[in-house]
Image: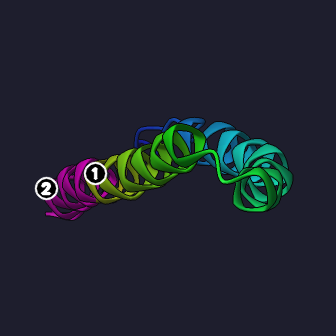
Amino acid sequence: MKEPPKLKPDRSKPAFTATVLLWIMLAIPGAVGALIYQEWLVLCGIAAGLIFIVLLARFIRHESQKVEAHEEHIMKLWRY
């Protein structure tokens, strides 16, 4: 009997998590400084970056769900 095909590990999630954590570590002190000095352009840039990260996270989650569904379909076909 043959073995089922090997699935590739998803490398995008750890890289995305590291990017988000780095952005947060830089954005929080930047936002505090921008509030103190009332730099509204910097605050708008930080807010835009946060919105972009949220939208990117939703896109990555949607794509990874599609990949997982495809892999699950392949494994079902393999069983029968």
> Counting residues from the N terminus, which is met first, the one under dot 2 or under dot 1?
1
**Residue at 15% over, 58% down:** 73
Q: Locate the C terminus by quadrant.
A: bottom left
Residue 71: mark in rendering: 1
Q: For this view, does 52 lie left or right of residue 38?
A: left
Question: Label 2 is placed on what type of residue?
Answer: Leu
Question: Does residue 33 appear in the picture of this structure?
Answer: yes
What colouring method underlies this structural image? Answer: rainbow
Mark 2 surroundings: few (<14), some (14-19) or many (≥20) residues within 10 A:
few
Mark 1 surroundings: few (<14), some (14-19) or many (≥20) residues within 10 A:
some
Q: Disc 2 to disc 1, how far (Cα)?
A: 10 Å
| Element on which disc 1 rests | helix
Residue matched to label 2: 77
Residue 18: mark in rendering: none
Q: Which residues are magenta?
A: 62-80
Please state which of residues 44 and 69 is positioned toward the viewer in this rendering: 44
User: In the rendered picture of this protein, how many numbered marks are placed on residues?
Assistant: 2
Question: Label 1 is placed on what type of residue?
Answer: Glu
